[in-house]
Image: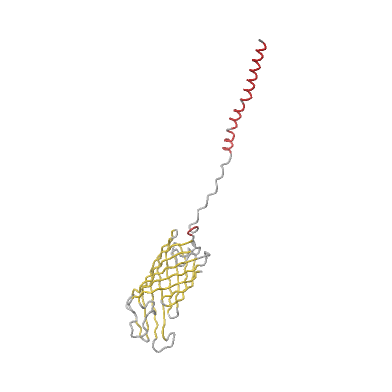
Amino acid sequence: MKTGSLSKAAVSVAVALVALFLAPAPARASAADPAPAAAQEGAPPEKAPPATPEPHASKGQWEYLERGLLFYPAGPGPGKDRWAVGAIWQIAPMFTADYKRGIGYGFTLDAGVQTIVLYNQLGVGAEWGAKVGPFGLGVMAHFNGYFGALGKAVIETTSFDATGWGILFDPGAKAGLQLTRDSWLTLQFEAYLNLYQAQKLGTLVLSPNAPSYMGFGASLVVEYSPKMQGVIYYGVSLYHTAANYPLWFNVEATPESEPFNPAMIWYLGLLAGYEF
């Protein structure tokens, strides 16, 4: 009996020891679980990756040149300027020089000259334009004074001697499209209103009594800036004007002919140059 009692007691002690050994393990596990959570609560929040900055309105896919463009409706920006030299073929070839300066709120002031010695034109004007993404729209108005000379004024001749002068008002509109990151296409339309003109044939001076409509011109111009600084421009123009616009184009070379021909004619023109 005593041996059996001792055996039972030994088994009971062994079970108690096993239970006592196994009991702390879950407790340790349960106590260990909140520790990481507590560490997470006390630790500073994990830094989020930096957000990609929003591109500036003038950067990215529709990046616009810092100094703007000469023909595209947006023009130079406020306080920026562009000047250019080039040539235009409008029945006869002419040298051109242009200057534009942005004054803010989409407005631009400009001045330009065209000359072939026989015909010289100096103009000033203003434009307003705006762009949204790749598109641009604008309106413009220019006043141009011109002077020309033929015959004895340039080449000594006994058959023809004439000079002419006048003032033109040219209102117009523009629409532009950015083709690629470094090229722009502009469609430009101008109407030609002759506010005053006079022509001296020998000793006879002729002048119409009222301002007259002289026609219109439409130009399609590409501006390309491979290095996003200087700009190459080139384009084609379509004209529908009076036969004597500009003054010396298609005029008869005799004092007896009609100096202010109302007939309207169609013809093409070309233009090209470089913007600095």
Q: Hey, which residue is sitting farthest top in the picture?
A: 1
Q: Is residue 260 left or right of residue 177?
A: left
Identify the image's colour scheme: rainbow, by chain, secondary structure or one colour: secondary structure
Instruction: Report the front residue among 218 and 193.
Output: 218
Position of residue 168 measured from the top left corner of the image (x, y, whole percent): 38, 74
Quadrant in the rendering for residue 148: bottom left
Position of residue 68 measured from the top left corner of the image (x, y, whole percent): 48, 64
Instruction: Report the front residue among 201 and 27.
Output: 27
Q: Quadrant of the N terminus?
A: top right
Position of residue 35 measured from the top left corner of the image (x, y, whole percent): 59, 34
Q: Residue at left 61%, top 28%?
A: 25
Position of residue 133 measured from the top left corner of the image (x, y, whole percent): 45, 58
Does residue 92 sit above or below 176 in this rendering? below
Q: Residue at left 41%, top 83%?
A: 150
Q: Residue at left 41%, top 88%?
A: 157
Q: Residue at left 58%, top 39%?
A: 43
